[in-house]
Amino acid sequence: MVRSNRKEDEMQYRELGRTGLRVSDIGYGAWGIGGSGWIGAQDDESLRALERFIELGGTFIDTARGYGRSEELVGKVVRRHPGDGLIVATKVPPKNGEWPARPGVPVEQTFPGQHIRASVEESLRASGLDAFDVLQFHVWSDEWVGHGDWLETVQALKDEGKIRFFGISINDFEPEQGLALVRSGAVDTVQVIYNVFHQQPEEQLLPAAQENRVGVIVRVALDEGGLTGRITGDTRFEPGDFRARYFGGGRAEDLERHVQALTADLGIETDELPDRALRFVLAHPAVSTVIAGMRTVRNVERNAATSDRGPLPKDQLEILKRARWERDWYVEPGKTSRFE
């Protein structure tokens, strides 16, 4: 797709692996606007935020079949901007409805070809779009490489013009689960959690993606809001909001202590932390785009400005490197595994 000559263009752009697509380095994560998991989004403000993202030069938008009304809202806005070079990625949920993928579960139970095709057709109907630029599986296990009919189905959907490229969304905090697929040459993009606290992808996944020219889409760069500095031990979430569990069991208090120490080490105010957190992720050369959740115009404008600020000073990057704090908070408090 060709970018338009918009007057307001504060974004920077990067190659999305070997796809030939150039994407805004700040992408739009559309989970939060769909009403599924994140509570409190208002459609009017969500639509304004997405429009503002496009005005400021944003081109990459990430949604999913499992994000409630997200695909519908994304499609409504994208259809208003033909020729503006917008790049839309969506995801197929696993047929068995299990997040993350459990070890030993065959791919025939998660991504059989018939299910993939039906999900894509439903996503196209919901969004009103003719095709998706990137289709991703919403969970992944490297046990599935070489098994099932998913790869043939993906190729058929490409041949039919319903999708352009194929990717996976790697299980939360399991970056090594995508290594075999990345090295197989069968995937164009990978989406992975990577942030100041969770730096594990730097060990194997990001170098492998760079070597194999696979585009990297980073999610949860702000730790579900933990790296915005706005969540404290006194923060409360509405019933049904997944963050009530994510930050539950004393975790918000632990987070507050870590954030206070980090901002003190950096010598910054708390409201400057999102900028540093996003620029930390963008400092890695393997990263193509960071999909930040932006439900308000204010957040869009803040993150767009981050795109234009350039690399972090070396001393701040080193401080952020030392802030690594590996923990999987998707596990419920008191448990040691999501499979318990």
Image (spheres, rainbow, N blue to C red):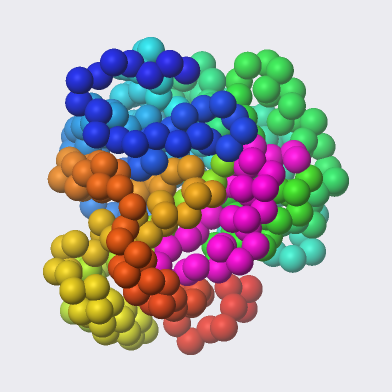
Up the image or down, 230 lies above or below 87; here it is below
Up the image or down, 245 lies above or below 254; here it is above
Give the farthest residue toward the front: 314
Q: Which residue is nearer to you in this view: 205 or 129?
A: 205
The answer to if 45 sits in the magenta stretch is no
* Res 110 seen here: yes
Residue at x 49% of width, y 22% of height: 125
* Magenta segment: 185-214
Image coordinates of residue 276 in percent, x first then y, are 28, 60
Image position of 221 (left or right of 157):
left
Quadrant for the C terminus in the image: bottom right
Q: Which residue is nearer to you in this view: 102 or 223?
A: 223
Up the image or down, 81 lies above or below 238; here it is above
Residue at x 29% of width, y 55% of height: 39
Up the image or down, 325 lies above or below 1; here it is below
Residue at x 31% of width, y 24% of height: 77
Residue at x 37% of width, y 30% of height: 59
Image position of 248 (left or right of 156):
left
How many marks can you see? 0
Q: Quadrant of residue 61?
A: top left
Image coordinates of residue 201 in percent, x first then y, are 56, 62
* Res 108 seen here: no
Image coordinates of residue 17 in percent, x first then y, are 58, 37
Q: Quadrant of residue 34?
A: top left
Give the farthest residue toward the top: 83
Image coordinates of residue 89 in percent, x first then y, are 50, 34
The answer to if 206 sits in the magenta stretch is yes
